[in-house]
Amino acid sequence: MNDDQQPRVRAARPADLPRLAELAAEHAVYERAEPPAPGLADRLAAVLFGPGRSRARCFVAEIPGGEVVGYASCAPEFSTWQASEYLHMDCLFLRDGHRGLGLGALLVEAVAAEARALGMPQVQWQTPVWNEGARRFYDRMGATGREKLRYSLPVAPQEAPE
């Protein structure tokens, strides 16, 4: 079989941005979260492909024929307890009907390869406690989990002094 007939994972390209925005909206629905604000593709463009080397990375999963059906995004973070950087996988999502086909493992391996390339010893991520399918998948990969609550604190932009 040639490469066009195999599912694959590759680095996201600017042309993928509209599809990434669609997938992120589907991901939010799947995780029972608020949808992304309008203009997500433009904001992603600035973060992923803007001037200078961005810290954020994104990989996409393609099925034969070139349709993008999933993605994983990541960025370096710091662990005080380990006194080292790690790669934080912010999102891993595959559309319904495309899970269980090996694409999730390919996405995780792409993120792990990025961590190795950056000299980082570890990848960390979170998943909702209720997401049993994801938890089984991560456990089969040999990952270890620890339950925590994730908090978010909105911070208004600082006003410029007059």
Image: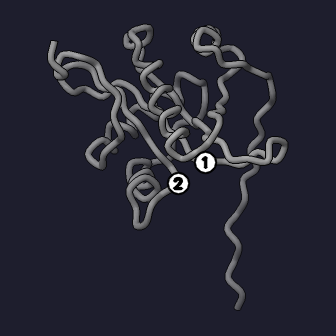
Apparent side of residue 60 relative to residue 145 in the rendered image (left or right): left
Reading the chain from its start, which is encountered first: label 1 or label 2?
2
Checking the image for residue 29, the label placed there is none
Dividing the picture into quadrants, the one containing residue 42 is: bottom left
Where residue 118 sits: x, y (%)? Answer: 54, 47
Apparent side of residue 150 relative to residue 58 in the rendered image (left or right): right
Q: Is residue 116 above or below residue 158?
A: above
Question: What residue is drawn where x is 46% and y is 19%?
Answer: 104
Dividing the picture into quadrants, the one containing residue 69 is: top left
Question: What residue is drawn where x is 72% and y is 53%?
Answer: 154
Figure colour scheme: one colour
Checking the image for residue 55, the label placed there is 2
Can you say which quadrant of the picture contains the C terminus? bottom right
Q: Local crowd at mark 2 within 10 Å, few (<14), some, or many (≥20)?
A: few
Where residue 145 sits: x, y (%)? Answer: 73, 20
Label 1 SS: strand
Q: CA distance from mark 1 to mark 2?
A: 7 Å
Could you tell me if the residues under marks 1 and 2 are in contact, i.e. CB atoms within 8 Å?
yes
Where residue 131 sits: x, y (%)? Answer: 63, 14
Can you say which quadrant of the picture contains the N terminus? top left
Query: Disc 2 residue type?
Result: Arg
Checking the image for residue 76, the label placed there is 1
- 145 or 84: nearer the viewer: 84
- 67 or 55: nearer the viewer: 55
Where residue 78 sits: x, y (%)? Answer: 72, 49
Q: Is residue 86 above or below residue 155?
A: above
Label 2 SS: loop
Apparent side of residue 1 relative to residue 73 in the rendered image (left or right): left
Question: What residue is drawn where x is 72% and y is 19%?
Answer: 144
Query: Disc 1 residue type?
Result: Pro
Question: What residue is drawn where x is 35% and y is 28%?
Answer: 9
